[in-house]
Each structure stands twice: as C-alpha cells, then as structure tokens.
Image (cartoon, helix red, strand yellow):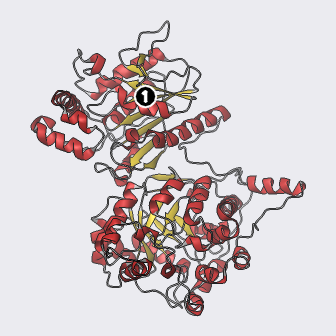
Amino acid sequence: MTKTPTAAPVSPAGAADPSRWLRTYHSRAAAAARLVCFPHAGGAANAFVALSAALPEDVELLAVQYPGRQDRRGEPCAQDLSELAAGVAGALAAASDGRPLFLLGHSMGALVAFETARLLEEHGGAAARLFVSAARPPAQDWEEPDLALVGDAELVAGLRRLGGIPEPLLADPEISAEILRLLRADHRALLRHRCAPGTAVAAPVTVLLAAADPKNSLAQMADWARHTIRGHEVVTLSGGHFALLERPAASALPVTERIRGDLARAESGASGASGAPDPEPLADLVRELMLEGLAGRTPRLTTDLTALEAAAGRVMAPEAFAYVSGTAGSGATGRADRAAFDRLRLVPRMLRGTRRADTSVTLFGQRLPAPVLLAPLAAQQVAHPEGESATARAAAATGVPMVLSTFASRTLEEVAEAAGDHPRWFQLYLPSDRAVGESLVRRAEASGYAAIVVTVDATHLGFRPAELDSGYSPFLRGTGIANFTSDPAFRAGLPADADATATVLRWAQISTDPTLTWEDLARLRGLTRLPLLVKGILHPDDARLALEHGADGLVVSTHGGRQLDGSVSALDALPAVRAAVGPDVPVLMDSGVRTGSDVLKALALGADAVLYGRPYVYGLGLDGGRGVEHVLRCLLTDLGLALALTGCASLADVGPHVLANGDLR
C-alpha cells in the first residue's frame, strides 16, 4: 500500500510562521513556481495530495488548511470568506521566497482564492494566474440553500449524487457527522460572502470546468471575464463536479501547461492573458521550410491548400476518395461555395507595424488560438487507419479544436483520449431513437466535449452521384458507426444474437430522423447545459427560429455542397444570417473554405470562426496525423499573414472594410 505523504508546514526562516495555513505534501525546493490550492466547502488541505503528486518537479503545491478541521479542529470555523482570504494572504506574504504564486481554488475555494489574489495586489504582491474549478463567478448568485435547514439524510444523499467523498467515509457515522459540521459551517460563510460586480484582479483567470458537473455550466462561467483585467479562458475537464481532484493526472496537464507558459512569457518579457497556444510568428513556417530547402529537403506535402484534393485523389482508394470529395447532383453548390470566395477581393494596407497578428478568438468562454475548428467529417478511417484519433492528436498539436462527427469511425471516448485536454466539440445527428440521442449527449458531456453542434440539413441524404456510381457507403461496411455500436442505448435495441449485418441495419433505421421539427431542437436544449449550435442554416428566418428554440450559436453551411444541388452558397448566405441574429450570437460558417485568405473573407462578412473540412482529411489520407498537422500549420500561417497584410493586428480589426468595395460582392 502506498503511504500518504505526511504534511509539512511551510515555515521559511526569518518570516512570520505561516504553518497555520499552508501545507506541503511533496517539497520541491528547486521548483520554479508554487501552486497554492484552496479546498472546497467542508474540505481540507489533504484533498490536494494526489494533485501534488501528479505535478512535475518544477511546480510545488501548497495546500491551504482552513480553521476548524484536522490539525486546526480546536479553532472555530471562519465566519466569512474574507477572513479566510486574509489569513492565507498573510501566510503567503510571510512565506514568500521570490517564486511566482499561482492560485487554484475548487468550488468555494475559488472565491477564497479570488479574494486572496485581490488582497495580495492591495499589498503590493500579485498572483501570476488564478485557476478556478467548479465555481461560478464571485458576483453571481450561487443559488445555494441554507444547509442549516437541510436534514442530515438529505444532505448526505446530495453529497452522494455530487461525488467526491468516498462511500466508506459517508457510511461512517462519526466521520459523516464531522463532514456535515464543516460543510454547514463553510456554507454559512459562503452565504455571507458578497462581491461587487466590478471587482477584478490583475491575474488572468483559467476556469477548469468539468463537462458533467451538475452544478455549473459553461454559460455561467462567462462572467469570470468581468473579474479580471487580463482575460479569461475555459478549459474543459472530463468528469463531474470533483474532476479536478478525482483525476489528478489529467488535471495537472492544463495547469502545468499554463504555469510554464506564463513563466516563459515573463522571462521573455511578453504578455499573455491565456495559456492557450500563441499563434506562430508570421513567417515561422515559411522560414522553417526555406531552411529545410537549403539542406536539400522539401515538404512531404504541398503547401498549396487548393492542390491537396488532386494529390489525395492519386493515393486514396477510388471509392474512399469519391466519398470524401463528392458533392450533390451536378456539383453546382460546391462550385458556388468556392466561387463566392473567389469573387471577393481583399485590400492590402501598408506600414501598420504588425509584427505578429493576434488570431485568437473567444467562443462560449473558451479562448482559442485561431478562429478555426475542424469540421465534423464522418468515417475518417476511409482516409487513414487511425482515422479521427490521428486527427485529434494533430488538432491538439496545433491548438485547433476538433468537432467530432456522430458518424465517426472511432468512439467519442477514444477521440477524447487522443485529444487530451485540448478543446473539442461534438456534432450530433439526432437519431429517431431518442434514447440513443440522449445517451450520445451524456457520453459527450462525460468525455469533456465543450459544445454540441446539431446538424439539421441532412435529415434526407443528398443525391450524390460519386457515391452512387461506386455503390459505396462506408457505414454499410461498418465504418463510421462506432459511436452507435459502443452505445448502451443502441445495443439495448439489438437482439441478443445480432450479427454485423443486423447491427448495420439497425443503425440505418435509427441514425437520422426525417420527421424532425424545431420542437425537437427545444427538447434537445432541455437535455444539456452545454452550448448548443445549429449547423446547416442558410436562411435568416431559420436562424431566428433556431435561437427561439434554444440554440446558442449557428453554423452557416451547405454541408460542403453535399446536400441540395443548386443551393445558395454558404458565404453568400452569411451576411443575411448575421444581420438576422445581431452581433452577439456566435456565428460560424463552413463550405468552400480552403485558405487563410478565405478565413479572413468569412470573418469580414460576419463569421466569428470557420469550420475547416475536406483539406485536413486530404492531409490525413496523404500522410496520416502528420498530414493533418501540416495542413493546419499552413492554414494558420496563411491566415496570420493575411491579417498582417491587410493591416489587421487582431481579429478585432477585421470588418467589411478589408474587402474591395466594402461588403459589395
């Protein structure tokens, strides 16, 4: 059995003794930074033992011990959170040894950490960054009941539902009574706490949000932006309310990444409000390839993103290539999608002093390094044996979020594992079997997907000659149905002796639903607290209806030209959709996007970001995960250069004025 490390009070020589407040479980004197962790209501310092062990040697964890528990049981519990913050701030000042302090608070501890950061700043100190987990913003009503009015049995039942406390502890009457005593005392302090809406700290804020947290949602986290002058971001963790503590190895990764990033920026003199990957300097990829050329080496794949389709067509199996590249009918919609971009002309601007364009964007509280996400393309194993898993790793390496298709050839859990802690969304085709649809949503929540993108333009499959002429459907051959064959609700509808053929036939029967109406969107809205986007919108009235029925955002799309032949192009439809919903609703678009200049044109007409589709799958077919990463690096470099060459230092500078004749096409 592994022995739990003994807590050693932090007590620097010559300073006031902070041992009442701070504990360290893994002393790391050579660590470059200290992470100060504040426990939840009813919690104690030892809640962070596992996280301390999971951190690397360059980060030392200090756990805060509140009065009234364990070795401080003889002291009364705090009457107010500001009392706790004052004690910790004083202890940290006394324990200061010049190393940067990063603060992390879980649930109620996030409010104490916030107040501590504020007090440190008032007295000339500073926290380098504030991490908050399972916590609404400090000025927001937490809607907590008075636990003095809640009976013991009801309170214990609530703790069981929330998780985080081992069952043997709750089952022990003496231990359970002590947990309830502390919980009620801490809640009294929490209920007394008040924070003015405009109160802000100088430290950037990273919100660690568990995807399946029943008490907190992504929408509620947005107001953390009001409490920092340096910017905030949301990082999604897999698991429930106590994911931070129950999955310490996974939790340590984003925390460590941001601490190291902040230290590196401080050393270089750069600033950064978020730990998300910074965009590459404008010409880094260009310089890299030129230096390779001096050594006689050329890139494995072309950097011409419009030439990838032809290259992939030469190496992919003909039927697989036909599936990926094919469009509806005569191909008129696909051609219109591209022609709409080609009609627009960008206007270069000179001498703007833009060394590095800031391509970052915030969507639903998450800061992304670029306004690009990978579109949900199905059955990617037709392009490469690793399929979506290879794509997820490449997306994570470049900082680009992936939107995973319902019809993926790898399960959403497998793709989540490949993506690690990098942002990802889940695209949903609503099945006719509602139990399967709900099960898919629950699995996405539990696996850390940060948004649901429901596709509404494919309730009927388009007429696609390339697929029909080859008689090829990957799904009928068992590729692209992994999320169904792994789903308990789907399997519950199969006979016990179902073979592969019966499984595929069952999938074909329930995988989509041509009878869907807007009321079904409203029902889906009631299933999840994740942001909900509707994909496939081309008409302003449909955009309004989507919002009326619960959508948080929209994706203007022709499904890559694969549905209705002769349709309006996505780019042509974009301005009217934006006008219909106003400036504050997130609007994304796809269909026809190939280059960085294309991305800029979409942003100029009102898109907040684009979904990037076929080119990355061509990269996957040509060179696996390396091919996807190459395509994305080319796209992001091209976008950064396009911004700089049009005089835009950031996305905030982009508008119709970057186009010739404004928005006239």
Residue furthest to the front in view is: 497
Q: Residue at x 59, y 62 (%)?
A: 391
For the C terminus, the image quarter is bottom right
Q: Residue beneath label 1, please? A: 2
Element class at badge 1: loop
Q: Residue at x 70, y 52 (%)?
A: 354
Which of 257 and 535 lies nearest the eye of the viewer? 257
Give the percent coordinates (x, y) of residue 39: 34, 31
- How many numbered callouts? 1
Q: Amino acid at mark 1?
A: Thr
Q: Quadrant of residue 76?
A: top left
Residue furthest to the top in view is: 14
Crowding at mark 1 (Cα within 10 Å: few <14, some 14-19, many 20+): few
Q: Residue at x 57, y 71 (%)?
A: 380
Q: Quadrant of residue 433?
A: bottom left
Q: Determine whether 100 is above or below 95 in the image.
A: below
- Left or right? Give the position of 82 relative to 305: left
Give the percent coordinates (x, y) of residue 576: 47, 77
Q: Determine whether 193 is above or below 334 in the image.
A: above
Q: Residue at x 43, y 35 (%)?
A: 201
- Left or right? Give the position of 550 relative to 402: left
Q: Determine whether 421 is above or below 45 in the image.
A: below
Q: Is residue 210 visible?
A: yes
Give the percent coordinates (x, y) of residue 476: 48, 82
Q: Is residue 549 visible?
A: no
For the N terminus, the image quarter is top left
Give the percent coordinates (x, y) of residue 601: 61, 70
Which of 582 and 499 lies nearest the eye of the viewer? 499
